[in-house]
């Protein structure tokens, strides 16, 4: 088993697992990205609390943190679901994608239930071939799970309500298990550190942004007068 | 080490701390009563708080025979007869004549010798029914639809199915005998609304089907699914190849049918 214990997205880009990301950097600009799907989601994060939380519910900050978490859960759930649909995985990686995908989808549904109308919408994703190759899938899965663990860890001390904190911790440990599982399958050390570092929201979103996995939706609706054959 | 050996070692390692703990506990009891007694270890801690989430059991993905997959063409690309260096079939643009993103309906995927992923897609070119292989890198993210539109020229009906179940049915006008609506498998490429044309009704869908007869028609002679200003002619063979519907039907279809939906014209 490799001694590598820090498989960040930077490393993935460096060794080519997301090689197409670099090619596409000019296709979806940072401005488009921030102004598009994730931008909309982030705007919702700042929207504040509504009627659903008015009486004794989570605070405005906790709603924002839960909405930040749902974006990461959308990302993971969509990634595993697409990997499964592509049928490019085999053996234990295919089994893991099936189990972890189901869990991530359950996380999404749970967040949607608790956030109701305040839940951020699912962004559009383009995983750029990483769901269609076993090796690229495992590298990306390791990076996703490590990122999620660090992101939950980064927000846990900021959560104000005990029930929201209990929810975050319940998911954090599951994500940590996923991280260990994916690391094991990829052949890297699952637990070589004594302490893990958290990631702030800005750091996390910067990493997600660098992958270009979140894209704007294709423009499929227009207003030009048709010139079909009639 | 044998299991019994392990057991002995384990017992020995437990006996010493337990003995030390007993001595410590006795010392605690004998401590002068004037000092406040420390809280007993493990006592009086509150129960863990309930989670804000009501987490359901994870549900595994089931095989879904009704799913179709499409992707936007993100750069000009040549479709080939085979993955890699196959014969050139067509050149695809990123934008349709209507100004929307161009789409390809994905049928299957494979890898070439260099490990690059290629996808076979239905193409919006003549002859109708043409498929070709595109490099995966030229396409955007995959999107899924669960709907399927079937147009029956003989009965002049259009039926939309979602997950295999019929959710919409309406009479339609199809092409006259000299400009027939082409048979085959196609897909919805775009949706046009809020334009100014009574002839096309309030909503028009563009398909990947093209008229093989009207070759000099502007913008490629694509077959549309749209409304009409002559509902009295429906159903029947009335059009230049397009699939016409009464306006109330096309408005309803506009709410039910997403872009990317496969279309079968039989």
Image (cartoon, rainbow, N blue to C red):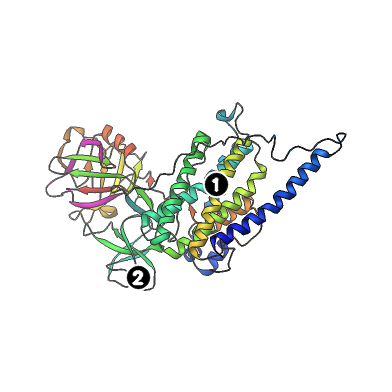
Residue at x 57% of width, y 49% of height: A173
- In the image, A30 versus A81, the foreground residue is A81
Magenta run includes residue B183: yes
Judged from the image, the secondary structure of the residue bearing numbered disc 1 is helix
Say few, some or many: other residues with alpha carbon within 10 Å of mark 1 (under 14 / 14 to 19 / 20 or more): some
When the figure is inspected, residue B172 is found, relative to residue A3, above or below; the finding is above
Image x and y of residue A148, in percent: 56, 51
Task: Find disc 2 in the rendering and name its residue.
Answer: B112
| Horizontal side of residue A103 vs B135, given as left or right | right
Q: Looking at the image, is mark 2 or mark 1 nearer the viewer? A: 2
Residue drawn at 63 percent across, 46 percent down: A155
Label 1 sits on residue:
A39
Q: Which residues are magenta?
A: B162-188
Real-space Cα distance between discs 2 and 1?
A: 37 Å
Residue B188 seen in this snapshot: yes
Return the chain for callout 2.
B
Is residue A25 visible in the rendered image? The answer is: no
Where is the C terminus of chain A found, in terms of image quarters?
top left
Question: For residue B128, what is the image quadrant?
Answer: bottom left
In what element is the residue under mark 2? loop
The residue depicted at 76 percent of the width and 37 percent of the height is B39
């Amino acid at each position: 088993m490799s001694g590598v214990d820090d498989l960040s997205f930077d490393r993935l880009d460096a060794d080519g697992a997301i090689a197409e990301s670099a090619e596409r950097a000019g296709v979806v600009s940072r401005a488009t990205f921030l102004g598009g799907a994730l931008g909309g989601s982030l705007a919702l994060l700042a929207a504040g609390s509504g009627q659903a939380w008015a009486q004794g519910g989570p605070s405005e900050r906790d709603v924002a943190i839960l909405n930040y978490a749902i974006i990461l859960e959308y990302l993971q759930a969509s990634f595993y679901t697409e990997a499964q649909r592509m049928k490019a995985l085999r053996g234990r990686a295919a089994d893991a994608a099936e189990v972890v995908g189901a869990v991530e989808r359950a996380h999404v549904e749970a967040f949607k239930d608790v956030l109701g109308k305040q839940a951020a919408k699912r962004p559009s994703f383009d995983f750029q071939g990483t769901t269609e190759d076993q090796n690229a899938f495992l590298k990306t899965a390791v990076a996703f799970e490590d990122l999620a663990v660090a992101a939950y860890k980064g927000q846990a001390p900021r959560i104000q309500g005990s029930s929201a904190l209990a929810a975050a911790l319940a998911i954090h440990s599951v994500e940590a298990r996923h991280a260990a599982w994916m690391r094991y399958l990829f052949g890297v050390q699952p637990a070589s550190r004594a302490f893990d570092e958290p990631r702030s929201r800005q750091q996390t979103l910067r990493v997600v942004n660098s992958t270009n996995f979140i894209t704007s939706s294709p423009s499929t609706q227009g207003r030009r007068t048709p010139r079909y054959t009639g | 080490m044998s299991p019994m050996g392990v057991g002995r070692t384990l017992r020995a390692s437990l006996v010493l701390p337990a003995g030390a703990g007993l001595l410590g506990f006795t010392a605690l009891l004998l401590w002068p009563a004037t000092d406040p007694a420390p809280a007993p270890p493990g006592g009086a801690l509150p129960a863990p708080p309930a989670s804000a989430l009501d987490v359901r059991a994870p549900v595994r993905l089931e095989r879904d025979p009704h799913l179709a997959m499409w992707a936007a063409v993100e750069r000009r690309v040549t479709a080939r007869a085979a993955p890699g260096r196959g014969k050139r079939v067509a050149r695809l643009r990123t934008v349709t004549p209507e100004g929307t993103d161009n789409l390809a309906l994905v049928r299957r995927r494979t890898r070439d010798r260099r490990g690059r992923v290629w996808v076979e897609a239905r193409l919006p070119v003549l002859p109708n029914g043409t498929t070709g292989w595109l490099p995966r890198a030229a396409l955007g993210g995959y999107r899924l639809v669960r709907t399927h539109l079937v147009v029956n020229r003989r009965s002049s009906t259009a039926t939309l199915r979602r997950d295999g179940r019929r959710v919409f049915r309406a009479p339609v006008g199809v092409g006259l005998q000299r400009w027939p609506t082409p048979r085959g498998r196609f897909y919805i490429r775009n949706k046009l609304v809020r334009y100014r044309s009574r002839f096309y009704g309030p909503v028009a869908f563009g398909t990947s089907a093209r008229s093989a007869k009207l070759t000099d028609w502007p913008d490629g002679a694509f077959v549309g699914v749209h409304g009409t200003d002559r509902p009295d002619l429906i159903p029947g063979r009335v059009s230049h190849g397009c699939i016409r519907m009464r306006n109330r039907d096309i408005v309803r279809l506009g709410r039910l049918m997403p872009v990317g939906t496969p279309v079968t014209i039989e």
